[in-house]
Amino acid sequence: MTTEKSKQVTLRPIVLNNWKKAISLQVHEDQRRFVSSNIHSIAESRFYETAYNYGIYEDEDMIGFILIYNPPDEPKLGHIVRFMIDGNHQKKGLGKQSIKLLIDLLSTQFSKKKVTLTVIPENHGARDFYENVGFVNTNELVDGEIKYKYDIK
């Protein structure tokens, strides 16, 4: 009897040697209207000193992308601007593992106590996902999107 070794999920900065892989990742066709492309996200992040891009890896395979922003005027707040898992890797629990790693990174590396993000109201899949991992719907709209928050304990 053989057992399959579980794969390790990690977050790694987007740098010169992995950005092309990051921009090749895509969500499912029906999700694309809800999520900006990774190339757009990487370009956007270059205008903000406190924005950081990360690849989500399963072992050595990049399977997702994250863009976070740490508002300079709110030192205890981290904001998730983009979070995506490539369509070929969804529904495997990798998003849940990744969001937990991201919250831990925001807490330990950036000393954050609260995390926020926004979701397009019609994106029920994302809303369900974030609520299932502990984010709370604040019932506030920010630029037409629903604001969620997560308090780090």
Image (cartoon, helix red, strand yellow):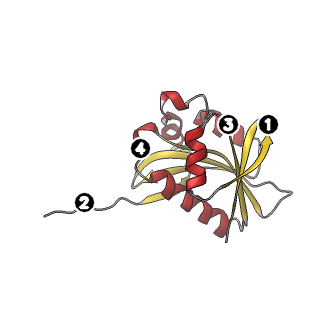
Q: Mark 1 points at which residue?
A: 143
Of discs 4 and 3, which sits in the foreground?
Answer: 3
Q: Which of marks 1 and 2 is nearer the N terminus?
A: 2
Task: Please name the amino acid that badge 2 sits on.
Answer: Glu
| CA separation in Å, label 3 and label 2 | 38 Å
Is 142 placed left or right of 55 in the picture?
right
Q: Which mark is residue 120?
A: 3
- Residue 37 image offset from top left, x and y in percent: 59, 33
Q: Which of marks 4 and 2 is nearer the N terminus?
A: 2
Q: Mark 2 points at which residue?
A: 4
Of discs 3 and 2, which sits in the foreground?
Answer: 3
Q: Which of marks 4 and 1 is nearer the N terminus?
A: 4
Q: Name the residue under label 4.
A: 89
Is 140 placed left or right of 95 in the picture?
right
Circles 1 and 3: CB atoms closer than 8 Å: no
Q: Which of marks 1 and 3 is nearer the N terminus?
A: 3
Of discs 4 and 1, which sits in the foreground?
Answer: 1
- Dot 3: few (<14), some (14–19), or many (≥20) neighbours within 10 Å? some
- What secondary structure is marked by label 3? loop
| CA separation in Å, label 1 and label 2 | 45 Å
Task: Please name the amino acid that badge 1 sits on.
Answer: Asp
| Residue at x 86%, y 57% (from the top left corner) | 73
Task: Please name the amino acid that badge 4 sits on.
Answer: His
- Residue 148 image offset from top left, x and y in percent: 70, 51
Please tell me whether residue 76 is drawn above or below residue 139 in the rendered image.
below
